[in-house]
Amino acid sequence: MADDKVNLFQDVYFVLIPSTDLSEEVAAAYVKKLTSRGATQLQLSSSQLKHVTHIISTSCDFPAYNDAIDALIPVVTPRWIDHAIDKKKAPNPRTYCPDPQHYFHDVVVAFADEIPLGDRDAIIGGIQAMGGQYSEPITKLVTHIVALTLDSRQCRVMQEKNLDAIAVLPHWFDHCLRLGRRIVEEPYRLPEPSILIEQNMSIPPRVYRSTALDELNTMDPLERMLEPPAAPQLEEKEESVFKNKRIMLHQDLDVQGHLEQTLSQIISDGGGAVVDNVDEAEWLICHLRNTPEYFKAARAGKDTGNLNWLYFLISRNKYQCPMRRLLHYPYPENGIEGFRNAKITISNYTGEARVFLDSLVKAAGGSFTKNMTPDNTHLITAHMASEKCMAAKDWNIELVNHLWLEESYAKGKLQALSNSRYSFFPPRTNMTELVGQTPIDRVSLKIELDQNDPANASEDESDARSSSMPAVNGDNGTPNGRAAASGSSRRPARTPLAARLGNAELITPGSRGAKDRAISKLHGMATDIAAYEKERKRVGGVVYGGRRLNDPERVNVESNGRGRKRSIDEADEQQQDELAEDAPEESSPATKKHRRAPKSKRTSNETDVLLAPKPDPDEFPMINVLITGYKQELIPSKFVWSDFNINIVDSLSTKVDVLVVDRVLRTPKFLTSIVHAPVVVTIDWMLAMVAQHQRLSPESFMVEDPDWEDTQNQKFSDVLARAKRNRDNGGLLKGSRMYCTTNVRGKSDVIRAIIEANGGEAIQWNGTKAQIPQREENAEEDQEEEDQEEEDDALFGPRDLYLISEEADKPQWKKFIKHAKGQGYKPHVMKTEWLLTIASLQDLNVPREDHMCL
């Protein structure tokens, strides 16, 4: 045993990097653990780096990190030492790398027995790829246990031994791997994971503070003249980050006078020196990536940052690689290709995260707007619980998270929106916590250097010139005289045909030429095609298109005195009427025979854009109108409804003031709209407004459905009256908790929308007890409920719990009943038809016997 202890690290030559996370006492203890077991400590220098086998550090923020990685020297955290001693052998250093890109590097996972083997293998593979480890037994090294409930044997062992581990749902690993980032475990943590309990997506998820947010000291890329922060007071034995560093402040920073003197003084007070030659400098501070000094420093692997980075070093007195933070590295001169026409707005990001993303948009070359309009091209949001997200879907604006912006900037190239990572929003996770974690991509930066370095361009040109000049060895000035000997004459070199023609259209015969001409025409039409496609995909499509009256780009057309444009047919009619008035009163039968017959009435869908005055908002305020049950061709088109203070909506979650139907229906739109007690009218209301060119009151066009009233034995007006009462009291299903199985009639998301529209809470049932919270006993409430049940057993009580299901999900019924009773509830398993019936009638007093599954 003693020999094993002495020889455990005999082949290890290590360097320990001091940091604020590693106190002197702890660092000395780790050094002793290593040297007492045969390891040798070295100093971090360029001469000794080739002899180093391991670098011990709590982070990758030290100057030689990239050199170590290039030299294949493993950088590990101190946990590698502890685990090696516990296991009595050195473990794989890959799983202990402090690089933030290995976001599972401090995760050791174990599984509960209830997790299927296939799911285990998938999670283990993803964890190990991102630096994590797997442990079959439950030991003190385990940090996470994957389970569905706390009833498993592994979770009981964790609780009995009081281990410093947490139990999480497998969803956490799936969402982390989908994003490529480690998110906070709290929403997935047992026994009450909020992703299963809090199903109301309109409630914004909580923001958990990230250390990356604390390091986002950010200034506007267009603003250079900012006062540096005050340097912190150094403690005894604490060294300045600038000690023994030679730093060059480039001229493109445009720092002069007082600011230049202040920065130079801070550096010199810290033991550094300001130099004027990039060859002498170890660090280069510049603004853009376009100067010869930048290319030389970047090629030499010197630390190159901007004022953001310098101010970070001054304020924190802690070294950090300038490539760790996107806005610490010099800005691209012309932004990122593809961002020039991007008009970006932000939602649900606050504080430092919002300022950082604003600055990043400008650095990439895009334009940032505080308010969102239909002209915006992208909406970057932290989660989907905002009005901006709903409007973006209506306006066909791209909805993405901030990873799309960060990775486009990091790689110097616009990333494809089709990547699912950029449109994925984990439930109950606020993406704000992940802002600022993306570093500059080293591979992409090297490609950028190769493409833009003027030194490379001059070398390529000289090589091309030398290779294009033939060696003149023959008597006639030809290469080796072979051309003259063969009697052939060398044709003069000519530029390509397209270059000689300049901007003229290149016309070639045959199918290839036809293809080129067609492609050229398509390019010319690209703007119009894109505009049409955007309008066509918008909710409502081109049906409700047209510019508003107050739009400055609207083209005013000549009015015919009746409030709308004159069509071609009407112009012909007017011209013939004028000719008829000039003609003699008596006309021949032939003339009468060929006289044009009067035009028939226009159909509703041929109505032109109206030029009507906007109604008084006090008399006719803005209302939301939803249309359902009508074919598209029957709906009036080319009508600017917004000019009449009418907003056509198409969402199941939007408040509806007027519902346009031909009869009483049970469509999803009808059932989610009726809860708002709207005015229910027929399409005649809209047709009348088109005909009269003015806003009309809808009360005169109320829908009538005698067949439905005879079948249901009640008036539809009574349904609307109940809907109004329910709306004022919080909804038909207020306070109810309803679970839905997968195979409910229709789509499960539609059923959930109906439940939530009626004030209830809808939850997708997955068969686990964790979904049902433990009910607190209340004797008075229980007695009142029992008394009420004797009078009317159709009412919802505090103990009633409902599962909406169908025969296909029968195996889930017994689980639901068992778990509901175990948590103190009275379970009911109902068919989908029951929910649709009470929602359409807005009445809970519906016989349940025919709709019960059990």
Image (cartoon, rainbow, N blue to C red):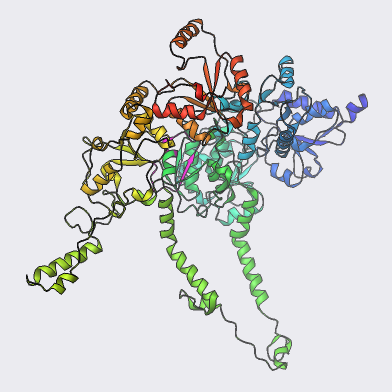
Question: Eyeballing the image, is 426 above or below 470?
Answer: above
Question: In the shown orientation, is residue 145 left or right of residue 428?
Answer: right
Q: Is residue 472 left or right of residue 834?
A: right
Q: Give the quadrant of residue 707.
A: top left
Q: Residue at x 41, y 52 (%)?
A: 536
Magenta segment: 371-389
Residue 479 in magenta stretch: no
193 vs 625, nearest the viewer: 625
Q: Is residue 612 above or below residue 593?
A: above
Q: Position of residue 225 (x, y in %)?
A: 45, 43
- Residue ID at (59%, 61%): 454
658 and 275: which is toward the camera: 658
Q: Main secondary structure of the magenta part?
A: loop
Q: Position of residue 54 (x, y in %)?
A: 78, 37
* Residue 318 lies in quadrant: top right
x, y percent for residue 721: 32, 25
Left or right position of 624 against 451: left
The relative height of residue 668 versus residue 585 in the rendered view (above or below) is above
Q: Is residue 384 magenta?
A: yes
The quarter of the displayed image where residue 462 is located: bottom right
Outermost left residue: 585
Which of the image's four quarters has the C terminus? top right
Count of numbered marks: 0
Q: Quadrant of the N terminus?
A: top right
Q: Is residue 519 visible?
A: yes
Is residue 43 among the parts visible in the rendering?
Answer: no
The relative height of residue 12 versus residue 153 in the rendered view (above or below) is below
